[in-house]
């Protein structure tokens, strides 16, 4: 594995869109959720970004969402600098799982910065009845944790890159408060394919 500057782990219930989110970030594509099988263990990919003239390699771990793999997921969030905890806007159970993961992260990895990510907001276009998780409840919870909250769509690419840009910026701010300003972020053309670390992934 090549050297990475920032370890990022994705956590959340199965079928909440974690793998689609990572594929959009790494390769800027959406093949449709039916293309992906459940992640077993975790899958890994990396991409180099440029922030204010500094290059930063983000190593992204997409962990399994199934309960039987939760113990394995705990191995992958160890020493992570950032955690993206995902839920689908049309799945109330996935939101309850967010709160469980946040509690666990704060207990075992208190130095890990938490980002709460709502997925599948494209389902709300023209039909807000598909939203099963109240937006105000999520923002209130994010303020309480505290954590940054962002709503995304891997299908159309909405806010995906903004999410990782924010993570990179926050990391550099924590490492070097002396930086005077941040320029616009430019993604370098150095993505890698997502690959499974524990089992073959379709």
Image: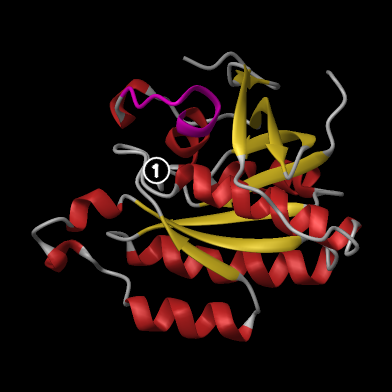
- Asked if the stretch drawn in magenta spans residue 103, the answer is no
**From the viewer's perspective, is 173 left or right of 23?**
right
Q: Which residue is mark 1?
A: 15
Residue at position x 71%, y 44% in the image: 8
- Asked if the stretch drawn in magenta spans residue 30, the answer is yes
Q: Is residue 81 above or below residue 104?
A: above
**From the viewer's perspective, is 40 left or right of 86?**
right
Residue projecting furthest to the left? 126
**From the viewer's perspective, is 179 left or right of 168?**
right
Quadrant placement of the N terminus: top right
Q: Is residue 39 above or below residue 191?
A: below
Q: Residue 175: image x %, image y %?
A: 90, 56
Q: Secondary structure at mark 1?
A: loop
Q: Residue 198: image x %, image y %?
A: 69, 22
Task: Give whichever of 150, 168 is nearer the camera.
Answer: 168
Residue at position x 36%, y 39% in the image: 157
Residue 34, quarter of picture: top left
Label 1 environment density (alpha carbons within 10 Å; few <14, some 14–19, many ≥20): many
Q: Is residue 159 above or below residue 150?
A: above
Total tally of numbered discs in the picture: 1
Q: Residue 140: image x %, image y %?
A: 48, 85
Residue at position x 76%, y 71% in the image: 106
- Which residues are the magenta region? 24-31
């Amino acid at each position: 594995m090549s050297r990475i500057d920032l370890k990022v782990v994705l956590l959340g219930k199965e079928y909440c869109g974690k793998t689609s989110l990572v594929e959009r970030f790494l390769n800027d594509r959406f093949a449709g959720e039916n293309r992906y099988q459940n992640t077993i263990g975790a899958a890994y990919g990396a991409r180099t970004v440029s922030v204010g003239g500094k290059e930063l390699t983000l190593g992204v771990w997409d962990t399994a969402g199934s309960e039987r793999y939760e113990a394995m997921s705990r191995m992958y969030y160890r020493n992570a600098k950032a955690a993206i905890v995902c839920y689908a806007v049309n799945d109330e159970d996935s939101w309850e799982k967010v709160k469980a993961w946040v509690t666990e992260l704060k207990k075992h990895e208190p130095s890990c910065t938490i980002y709460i990510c709502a997925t599948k907001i494209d389902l709300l276009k023209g039909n807000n009845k598909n939203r099963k998780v109240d937006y105000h409840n999520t923002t209130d919870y994010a303020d309480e944790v505290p954590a940054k909250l962002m709503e995304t769509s891997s299908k159309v690419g909405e806010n995906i890159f903004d999410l990782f840009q924010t993570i990179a910026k926050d990391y550099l701010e924590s490492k070097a408060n002396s930086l005077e300003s941040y320029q616009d972020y430019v993604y370098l053309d150095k993505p890698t394919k997502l690959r499974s670390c524990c089992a073959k992934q379709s």
